[in-house]
Image (cartoon, grey):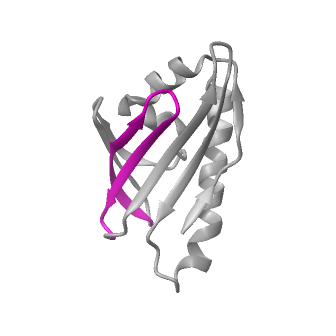
Amino acid sequence: MKVTGKTTTLNVPNRDVFTRFCNCNNFGKFLPDQIKDWQSTEDYCQFSIPGIASLKVNIAEKVEFSKIVFAANNDKNIPINISLNMNGNDLQTDIFAEIEADIPIFLKPMVEKPLQNLVDMIADKLKTEN
């Protein structure tokens, strides 16, 4: 299952946006307020969302100045990738989040809307952070 968020335009060079998100310490600024047990280093972060899951996130792939893929290992054993996709120049960057999750078909109706809300909320937080 793939969920794509809305695109946000940031008045920041794409190089700066890419560099910021290659550091997992910055990942938490763009997550829901209800996260608990936040821990991070430059290479990974871990946290829990009460009643949903505990996650450990690390960078799985980097495409310089255009894409960062985060792999989220969780206590539900459901593979989840969160991608930040960027397109920009020295003046501004268009960015959107995408979540790919190997959700069982019977759970899709229950999780699709919350995942869509999550990627859209990430876009909103990106806009207010910059």
Range covered by the magenta-colored residues: 52-76
Placement of the C terminus among the 4 image quadrants? top right
Q: Residue drawn at (43%, 45%), measured in percent from left and top? A: 69
Q: Residue 75: x percent and y percent?
A: 30, 65
Q: Residue drawn at (67%, 28%), measured in percent from left and top? A: 128
- Residue 45: image quadrant is top left
Q: Residue 22: x percent and y percent?
A: 39, 29
Q: Residue drawn at (34%, 70%), measured in percent from left and top? A: 76
Q: In the displayed image of the protein, which residue is found farthest to the top?
A: 90
Left or right of 104? Residue 122 is: right
Left or right of 73? Residue 100 is: right
Q: Residue 33: x percent and y percent?
A: 54, 44
Magenta-drawn stretch contains 5: no
Q: Residue drawn at (28%, 34%), measured in percent from left and top? A: 43
Residue closest to the eye, 103 or 122: 103
Magenta-drawn stretch contains 61: yes
